[in-house]
Amino acid sequence: MRAAACLLAVAVVAGCTSAPEAPVRTTAAPTPTPTPAAALPPLPARSAGCELPGEKADDLRAADVRTAWRPVWIDEERGSMSLLAAAPDGALWSTYRSVKEEDGALVSRDGGVRRWDGSRWETFQIPQARPPRWQTNVAVAAASADQAWVFGVSNGKSPKETAGVVAAFADGVWRAEPLPEPAARSVGWADTTARAVDGEAWAVNGPTAVSWTGGQWRQHPLPAAAGALSSGGGELWAVSGQNGEPAALRRESGAWRRITTPPFEPPADVTLPRATLSDVVVLGADDVWVVGGLSWTVLDEYDEENEPVEKGHPLAMHWDGKGWTCDWGPLTSTAGRMTRFGQAEPDGRGGLWVIGQRDVLWHLDGRRWTRHRLPAPPGAEPRVHSLAWRPGSREVYAVGSVVTKGANNSEISHAALWRS
């Protein structure tokens, strides 16, 4: 535990306690409620600057600056935090994994969901929707300290026996239930994203979205597979996410419409080309940012682990209400430190934050891009896993861990919370 004490010497530390076990309730799945809506035709959109850039191209021209982030809390115990949601009232909800040494080996376990009240964490255990089947949490959304949702998957012996589930926290009680079919075939599985939108929960994954109206879950078919979701200025958008074919979708008149995106042609004669639209940030109807990138494998080049090198450009794509403008970042590769644009969040000032590397966040202030390395105690490496903007504020939070090296080059990880 000496390593933890050293870490805490330079961090702001708050208590982390387990709350009295909240009552849990498991209920049967509700009657499926698909939401009928007329199919909307795709919206053609112009594009500019979206052709493959040259190797030396860099539209973003980001500068390294003194970080705008500060550590808020570092755990004394080993572990890590992964998912994060911020509510307008300032409450933060995050998933946690504990790490303990047992019989000479490190064992990682689900540590439940934590709620931050500004000074300390409370820990809650999520009930099983289909006991005794174990379940995995993959997305979290929060409307307040008193209302939150966790989406996950209840694992079976086969995909047919596996189903998406949701747990809701309201009135001090956790209630868990399987999602209705056919949404349970995709929502709650890996790559699901969830958001609280005007007090309602939305989640998307693959060909389906679900929303909570306060009385039941509604299902919404999507015109393309989605894996990321954002709202703002009365708009609700989704994009394909880090593992889907590039697509952008917008909610209109009770249905989802596909907005055409550029083709993103890869270089000729490359192996495993891959275009991704990882996340979306909605600042207004004519001010939407989509981040992602274009990458490929180079078979005759190898990294330090003797794996084929992957190269690529990060992408920031802007929607102005009529079309897309693409800004490409510099070419990087896995032979060094590759920049991959992942999750993005508004900054509350008309700009956005993007995870570029596991210890570096990129920021657009509306005019220029900058790079910010997350702070960590001396000798420790920061690793960010998730970002969350507190709606109605200029507060943005990040969770993850700080990692030091132990005996035999093992990693000692402690959960961490940062704020910009």
Image (cartoon, grey):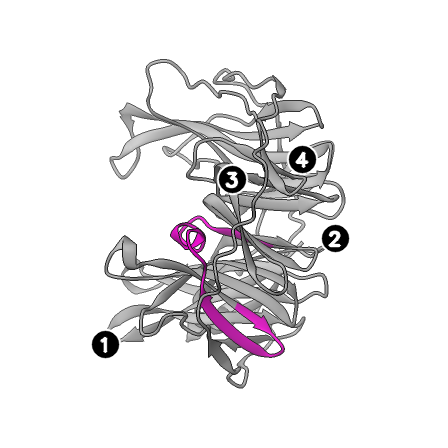
Which of the marked residues, 3 or 4, is nearer the chain's N terminus?
Answer: 3
The amino acid type found where label 2 is placed reads Arg
Q: Position of residue 232 (x, y in %)?
A: 71, 45
Q: Nearer the viewer, mark 4 or mark 1?
A: 4
- Badge 4 marks a residue whose secondary structure is strand
The label number, if any, that marks residue 222 in the structure image: 3
- Residue nearest the viewer, comparing 265 with 256: 256
Q: Nearer the viewer, mark 1 or mark 2?
A: 2
123 magenta-colored: no
Which of the marked residues, 1 or 2, is nearer the chain's N terminus?
Answer: 1
The amino acid type found where label 3 is placed reads Leu
Q: Nearer the viewer, mark 3 or mark 4?
A: 3
Tell me the magenta residue range: 168-195
- Badge 3 marks a residue whose secondary structure is strand
Quarter-of-image position of residue 325: top right
The amino acid type found where label 1 is placed reads Asp
175 magenta-colored: yes
Discs 3, 2 touching: Cβ within 8 Å:
no
Which of the marked residues, 2 or 4, is nearer the chain's N terminus?
Answer: 4
Quarter-of-image position of residue 29: bottom left
**Lateral position of residue 40 relative to residue 305, left or right:** right
* Spatial CA span between label 4 and label 1: 51 Å
Q: Which residue is mark 2?
A: 394
Structural crowding at the residue carrying mark 4, measured as other residues with C-alpha within 10 Å and reported as few (<14), some (14–19) or many (≥20)? many
Name the residue located 53 percent from the left edge and 53 percent from the top edge: 386
- Badge 2 marks a residue whose secondary structure is loop
Structural crowding at the residue carrying mark 2, measured as other residues with C-alpha within 10 Å and reported as few (<14), some (14–19) or many (≥20)? few
Q: Which residue is mark 4?
A: 288
Q: Which residue is mark 1?
A: 103
- Badge 1 marks a residue whose secondary structure is loop
